[in-house]
Image (cartoon, rainbow, N blue to C red):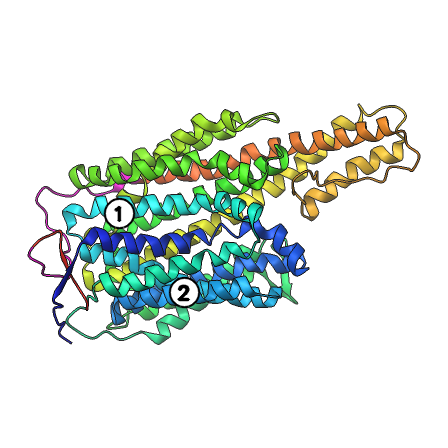
Amino acid sequence: MNRVEPKTQANPWLILLILCLGFFMILLDTTIVNIAIPSIIDALKAPLDQILWVLNAYILVYAVLLITAGRLGDIYSQRNMFAAGLAIFTLASAFCGLAQSTDQLIVARVIQGVGGALLTPQTLALITSIFPPERRGAAFGVWGAVAGVAAIAGPTLGGFIVTNWSWRWIFYVNLPVGVIALIATFLVIPDLRVGRRHRLDLVGVLLASAGLFGIVFGLIEGQRYDWGAIWGPVTIWQIIIAGFVILVAFVLWERTQEEPLIPLSLFKNRNYSLMNWISTTMSFGMLGLFLPITIYLQSVLGMTPLRAGLTVAPMPLVSMFVAPVAGRLVDKIGGKYILMFGLTVFALGMGLVDWLAAPDSTWLTFLPAYLVAGFGMGCIFAPLSTEAMREVEPRLAGAASGVLNTTRQLGSVVGSAVVGAVLQNRLATALHDQAVSRSATLPPQIPDSIRQQFIASFANAATGGLDVGRGQTGGSAHIPPGTPPELVAQVERYFHDVFVYGFLDAMRPSLAVPVIMVLIGALSCLAIQRRKSGASAAQPYAAAPEPAKVPASH
């Protein structure tokens, strides 16, 4: 199938703006909903375990379909798949806002995940196709700034919306953005196609989807089922292992296909393979870090959701300004040492957050640490994307982008699961130890039975799932009626102190895990192959006479 050259021209930076608009909306919805969970529970009268699927249904579908969606872009054109993803996601957002039950909301979130998966891989693929190699770093810098801001801005924006309006508006805000981006897509973004037809490897789709589903589902639900049985004799670990076995079968199948879902030739390029690994470590670190910090800011320091979001806000703000500059620098000197520097500085900044955390910390306490972390974050996305996609042929750009986004999403899920498990394990010990040591200092008027309840309640809270809402300690004990108010106040203060100091004791080693993972990613950058001077890279589709202009469809 020969491509027909369109007659109109479009500025690639305008195309990038539209791509980033859709990408920002998709990434924002992975975090913005978290902050609205209490409001959704109150409005829909739903239990917490059911509401958690409002979060997990989106993440699960999104992660599972990314590889298939990337290949669909290669077959039916990235522009068309980007538009389809926008349309599905925008309509699903309207259904989310209109949902009258938890089941309706979960179904709408599943559809949102389909739209998000269709859209995401096309952004990297279109940037690779539209921008010449010597200008991709700057483009990826802008794309990276959007990715960094969206991943962290969700709690801030969500807190503001929920505080001032209804939880439904965290979905309704997507409607005008989605409609504007969809119209602009057909007006500005070119319909680029390669000169031959592709076919979709349906067996590969089934194997990849089933394998990824098993792994992601197991990691998401593992904590809930205490990593044990889930349906009769079927355990979480069996589901995860089955997912890996199916993925091995998928790789063996792909080796026999003339047009595989994932062209394994991509991994012959050392930098592409390495960037998938580093993307995993980076996402593991970022998402793993924010879980304990979010609980700490709201439950230990007592911040409102909006104030907690604003405390973290300096990090994405700095990243937003640094990323485009880092991208332009990548075009000049390559991404190896910029990426290594960014990962190291980000880990240093988040290590400072862990070190500075105290029971009486304020947002000013963390400002220097978040500024450092934000500077490092701004130096990560552009070199990572540039080094990954630099030598990818345009006909494989969709598949390459799908795999890269999938490894990033898997890193996020694994990071959240591992750090959540470490935090819960450390809390079981820390809360018990704090309760034992502080029970001895309770007033002598408090009966021994209350002291034992005091210790047991925290041990049970840590092992059975800790309720960490604002103002909650996770523990409870029955105080006999008629107890003097001053004694009740003292007991309540001891409960608060046990939780605060116990959580801090548990948080420090929990945060060390993702920091170490990011540093491993930084060390891995030493293996990146530097681009040879004057070496050619994969060229964009469009044979436009000027690098700044590309064909656009009617």
| Quadrant of the image occupied by residue 439 | top right
- How packed mark 2 is, by other alpha carbons closer than 10 Å (few <14, some 14-19, many 20 or more), is many
Residue 151 location (% of width, % of height): 43, 46
Residue in view at x 57 percent, y 45 percent: 163
Q: Tell me, yes or no, if residue 436 can be seen here.
A: yes
Total labels: the figure holds 2
Asked if residue 443 lies left or right of residue 94, the reply is right
Camera sees residue 522: no
Q: Quadrant of the C terminus?
A: bottom left
Q: Which residue was labeled with disc 1?
A: 140
Q: Does the magenta segment cover residue 538?
A: yes
Q: What range of the chain is rendered magenta?
A: 525-545
Q: Secondary structure at mark 2?
A: helix
Please provide percent x and percent y for residue 41. 65, 55
> What residue is at 34 percent from the left and 53 percent from the top?
21
Q: Is residue 349 magenta?
A: no
Q: Residue at x 22, y 44 (%)?
A: 138
State whether residue 548 is above or below residue 533.
below
Circle 2 sits on which residue? 115
Name the residue: 80% across, 25% down: 440
Q: Quadrant of the N terminus?
A: bottom left
For label 1, the SS is helix
Label 1 vs 2, first from the N-terminus: 2
Q: CA distance from mark 1 to mark 2?
A: 22 Å
List the single residue furthest toward the right: 482
List x then y, in percent, for residue 436. 76, 30
Q: 48 and 549: which one is in front?
A: 549
Which amino acid, mark 1? Phe
